[in-house]
Image (spheres, coloured by chain):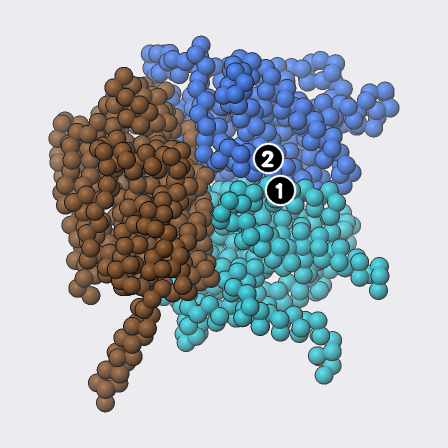
């Protein structure tokens, strides 16, 4: 009973997540969950360490390509495929992180952007990614060898489980001693250094964790859409995840998910038909408005409102 | 074809030429970024979009208002510069006191909007802009054919780059600028209108992008996304060179173009990535960049 | 016992298909048109393909079996992920019954993966990869206007025979370009020529100078442009800037009328190429093109004419089959020979290839052109079974 009381909010949310696919198109929901996880992973760097990475698309795509390739060619079960994709992104995160955490602020953003562009061209040219064609027809496979994921509904529950796992991991890290050190670095880096923390090591660890979880999101997304393409590696994807986090509220736990739902929703609404070309204009305007007047994002403003009024 | 020591001079010089041209654009754009960074400490993500607008204005000018190439070369950078001034005055200045990451995000948003508006109005495919008549044709240099317009690009951009360098390093106005970079408040105390100087500097840095756009219009077809991909390469170049000096930005820009050209000859598969790889090496050896100061 | 179970299962299965096969699902026939609406290939299909499909529906009477016919369209931006997601949503949510348009082969193959699984007809008008009827063939594909095999046979073969022996390829770097280069190289080698080099160029490249230089130093006497749309236009312009067109014969492997109209006539005059349609061929094509132009404002391309022809044939098949069920409609489409201004001496083979007459044409010089649409001079009509690949036995769905 105690458990239920203290987790009332979370339990309602999860119950809602369990019934919602009966009313809303499951593929759309899965997309929101994947991008929500991606944005939450990204937020680990921006919101909790205060470092803006402009190259997180690299990790999303690496997870997707590795999982997609293995699922198509090595006959793995989906959970193993996703695990491999996540590990690959973690390794890449270590490489990119070692190079980029040496620099700060704007330089860090530019270095990560350039590194991800390097990877974009690698994916464009490497034979195993099938270049512009993308990896097509990736099998969803049978979870643990016996749950067929080709049904959109079972796939949805699987994605929900992956999302919750990733989300829980982020929540735990942020509320651990490790997370406290990260926040200390964000607030006052020189002091964190003088307290004897090896700041670069902490930054690198956060970066690797963030990359791995982005890879988890990418791997899962590749299975949902049964396709992995260069769009995921493109710099616009890196910009999109920044936008999701900004809109939802950086440094908040639920912000990235809300931001992902908003951005994916807008994209879905405008894609196709005559309105398609407005997408970039709207995204850009949201960016400008958020930066000028709405820096706390939806969840941040909501928290502030609750705090001031209740 | 004749080869010397297994090297085909026509192809090699051809690729070097193409590299020099790309290098000219890199230099113009990274110079603009460096000037803006010097005073405002921000990176203008919209630089690529403003380059694209420069090209589009040249195309629109020719197509609808009968503006010839020569006039476009003069007027378009002014218009783009004015536009940049508006951006600085009304969007960037209100958040100038915040973390500089916000201004980076802001200019990214501006870039998305501009790119979106142009592709909404003109479609995402390229628009043709023919080479002005007096620069058409090919010069036979004996060892290779040099399209005259491409030679022209190199000459103009080198002149502009070194003119800017000279103005900043050797004139009084340049001295104020450099002083503002070091300590803006002190300069203000000497009676210089620093906010105005910041605005004008931003305008000038952006105008360079507009000029590059006009130069690019006849050889790259004019399209909304022409600036975005170029800008990422320029970012890598900025990281390689470091933000320390104006001269550094120019030299790094041109030499990266040449290195890219050489790669196209010797190992074309790597030509897209070579600059990024150089960046990785520089980060390993000298994280602050070749001409940068450790921060 | 086992046999009994099997028989029951088969009977049940048949009963199920029977149930599905009757009438029009959800009381309307919905056709989705997927194409690049604003990018490199916008002019060769794009909104014109939507207009062509709408025109076919209007000509058919707007209704089939007394049920309304609707069109939805989407921009795939030449991205497989976008195209595949759109098709998935069309089929899951919007109950689309057939998909038309289809330009970039990479997008087309991704869309096909989804559509084939859902057993919905895919009317491929403007994509060129032979994979739709070979390695990724499906009973639900109808590959309409042309494919790269027909282009290579129609364009490359006569040039090799005429003495162009050393070839260089400038190739669009994705499925379509790769397939076009591979098939053409096969034709060249079979006829005694050789490929001295090739370079793969990203889709949507605007500056071709360094690729042109590579072609120039290769010593080729023919440079094949294995690309299309804006890519073709830009690469040909680049070739003229560096004087490559004076050193070697430029060969456009896939050229649409919109590309020719976008180029200076001097640049492209006398190029010989293969097409499945051109508007000024005879009275029948002229009559249709005139109507299309009145509706859409531009001269129709081969892709747009193909989209019209395929839609009309599809609607006729729905009418005759009395249902919009994918299996029944495809069977009818293959059983009846398409015959209109576009599809001549035509049949839709069991593997999904629509085999029809192709035309080898020469681009007219400026002073030969009577009007803006008068750009091609017919050199030779190529019988479909001479230029298209024979059916791959593995894709013969009549035997399955």
Q: Quadrant of residue B136?
A: top left
Residue for point 43% across, 12% down = B133
Q: Position of residue A252 (x, y in %)?
A: 70, 58
Can residue B125 be seen from the camera position used here? yes
Q: Position of residue A219 (x, y in %)?
A: 48, 60
Q: Position of residue A61 (x, y in %)?
A: 49, 52
Residue for point 18% across, 41% down = C357
Q: Quadrant of residue C112?
A: bottom left
Position of A252 compared to A229: left or right? right
Question: For mark 1, what is the residue?
Answer: A284
Q: Quadrant of residue A163?
A: bottom right
Position of B224 compared to C55: left or right? right
Asked whether the residues under marks 2 and 1 belong to the same chain, the reply is no
Q: Chain of mark 2?
A: B
Q: Chain C in the picture: what colour? A: brown
Q: Secondary structure at mark 2?
A: helix
Q: Tell me the CA gap for discs 2 and 1.
A: 8 Å
């Amino acid at each position: 009973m105690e458990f239920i009381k203290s987790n009332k909010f979370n339990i309602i949310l999860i119950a809602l997540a369990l019934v919602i696919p009966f009313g809303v198109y499951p593929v759309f929901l899965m997309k929101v969950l994947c991008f929500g996880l991606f944005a939450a992973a990204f937020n680990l760097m921006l919101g909790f360490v205060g470092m803006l990475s402009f190259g997180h698309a690299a990790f999303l795509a690496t997870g997707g390509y590795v999982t997609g390739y293995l699922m198509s060619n090595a006959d793995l079960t989906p959970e193993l495929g996703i695990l491999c994709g996540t590990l690959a992104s973690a390794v890449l995160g270590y490489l990119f992180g070692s190079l980029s955490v040496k620099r700060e602020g704007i330089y860090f953003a530019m270095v990560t952007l350039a590194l991800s562009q390097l990877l974009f061209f690698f994916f464009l040219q490497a034979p195993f990614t099938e270049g512009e064609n993308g990896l097509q027809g990736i099998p969803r496979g049978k979870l643990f060898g016996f749950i067929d994921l080709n049904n959109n509904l079972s796939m949805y529950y699987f994605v929900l489980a992956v999302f919750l796992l990733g989300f829980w991991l982020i929540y735990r890290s942020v509320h651990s001693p490790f997370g406290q050190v990260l926040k200390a670095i964000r607030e006052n880096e020189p002091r964190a250094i003088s307290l004897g923390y090896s700041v670069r090591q902490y930054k690198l660890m956060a970066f690797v964790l963030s990359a791995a979880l982005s890879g988890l999101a990418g791997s899962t997304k590749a299975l949902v859409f049964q396709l992995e393409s260069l769009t995921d590696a493109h710099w616009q994807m890196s910009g999109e995840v920044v936008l999701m986090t900004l809109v939802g509220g950086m440094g908040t736990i639920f912000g990235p998910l809300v931001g992902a739902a908003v951005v994916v929703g807008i994209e879905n609404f405008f894609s196709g038909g005559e309105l398609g070309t407005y997408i970039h204009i709207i995204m850009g305007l949201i960016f400008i408005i958020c930066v000028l007047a709405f820096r706390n994002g939806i969840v941040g403003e909501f928290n502030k409102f609750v705090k001031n009024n209740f | 074809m004749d080869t010397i020591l297994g090297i085909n001079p026509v192809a090699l010089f051809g690729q070097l030429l193409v590299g020099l041209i790309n290098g000219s654009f890199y230099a113009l754009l990274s110079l603009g970024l460096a000037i803006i960074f010097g005073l405002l400490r921000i990176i203008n993500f919209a630089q690529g979009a403003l380059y694209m607008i420069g090209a589009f204005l040249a195309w629109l000018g020719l197509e609808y208002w009968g503006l010839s190439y020569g006039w476009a070369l003069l007027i378009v950078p002014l218009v783009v510069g004015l536009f940049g001034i508006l951006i600085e005055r009304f969007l960037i200045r209100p958040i100038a006191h915040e973390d500089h990451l916000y201004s980076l995000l802001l200019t990214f948003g501006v870039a998305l909007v501009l790119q979106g508006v142009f592709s909404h109005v003109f479609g995402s495919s390229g628009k043709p802009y023919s080479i002005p008549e007096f620069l058409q044709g090919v010069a036979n240099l004996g060892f290779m054919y040099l399209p005259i317009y491409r030679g022209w690009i190199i000459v103009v951009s080198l002149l502009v780059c070194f003119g800017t360098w000279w103005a900043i390093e050797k004139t009084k106005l340049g001295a104020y600028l450099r002083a503002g970079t070091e300590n803006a408040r002190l300069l203000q105390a000497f009676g210089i209108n620093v906010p105005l100087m910041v605005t004008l500097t931003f305008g000038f840095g952006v105008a360079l992008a507009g000029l590059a756009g006009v130069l690019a219009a006849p050889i790259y077809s004019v399209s909304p996304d022409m600036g975005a991909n170029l800008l990422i390469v320029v970012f890598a170049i900025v990281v390689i060179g470091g933000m320390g000096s104006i001269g550094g930005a120019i030299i790094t820009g041109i030499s990266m173009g040449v290195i890219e050209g050489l790669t196209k000859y010797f190992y074309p598969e790597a030509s897209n990535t070579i600059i990024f790889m150089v960046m990785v090496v520089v980060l390993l050896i000298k994280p602050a960049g070749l001409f940068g100061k450790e921060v | 016992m086992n046999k009994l179970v099997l028989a029951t299962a088969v009977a049940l299965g048949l009963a199920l298909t029977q149930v599905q096969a009757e009438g029009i699902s959800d009381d309307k026939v919905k056709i989705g048109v997927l194409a690049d609406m604003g990018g490199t290939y916008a002019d060769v299909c794009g909104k014109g393909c939507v207009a062509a499909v709408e025109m076919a529906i209007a000509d058919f009477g707007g209704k089939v079996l007394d049920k309304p016919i609707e069109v939805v369209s989407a921009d795939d931006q030449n991205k497989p992920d976008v195209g595949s997601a759109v098709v998935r949503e069309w089929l899951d949510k919007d109950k689309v019954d057939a998909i038309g348009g289809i330009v970039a082969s990479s997008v087309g193959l991704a869309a096909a993966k989804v559509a084939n699984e859902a057993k919905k007809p895919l009317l491929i008008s403007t994509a060129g990869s032979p994979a739709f009827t070979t390695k990724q063939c499906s009973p639900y594909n109808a590959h309409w206007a042309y494919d790269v095999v027909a282009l290579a046979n129609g364009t490359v073969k006569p040039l090799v025979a005429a003495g162009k022996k050393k070839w260089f390829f400038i190739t669009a770097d994705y499925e379509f370009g790769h397939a076009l280069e591979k098939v053409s190289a096969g034709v060249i080698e079979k006829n005694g020529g050789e490929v001295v080099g090739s370079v793969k160029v990203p889709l949507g490249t605007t500056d071709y100078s360094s690729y042109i230089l590579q072609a120039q130093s290769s010593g080729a006497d023919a440079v094949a442009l294995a690309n299309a749309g804006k890519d073709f236009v830009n690469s040909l312009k680049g070739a003229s800037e560096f004087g490559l067109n004076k050193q070697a014969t430029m060969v456009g492997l896939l050229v649409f009328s919109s590309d020719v109209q976008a180029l200076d006539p001097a640049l492209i005059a006398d190029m010989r190429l293969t097409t499945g349609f051109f508007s000024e061929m005879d009275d029948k094509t002229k009559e249709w093109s005139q109507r299309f132009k009145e509706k859409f404002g531009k001269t129709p391309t081969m892709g747009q004419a193909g989209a019209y022809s395929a839609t009309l044939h599809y609607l006729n098949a729905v009418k005759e089959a009395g249902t919009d069920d994918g299996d029944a409609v495809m069977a009818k489409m293959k059983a009846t020979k398409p015959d209109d201004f576009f599809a001549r001496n035509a049949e839709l083979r069991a593997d999904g290839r629509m085999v029809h007459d192709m035309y080898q044409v020469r681009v007219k010089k400026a002073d030969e052109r009577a009007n803006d649409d008068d750009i091609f001079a017919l050199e030779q009509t190529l019988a479909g079974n001479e230029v298209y690949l024979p059916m791959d036995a593995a894709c013969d769905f009549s035997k399955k």
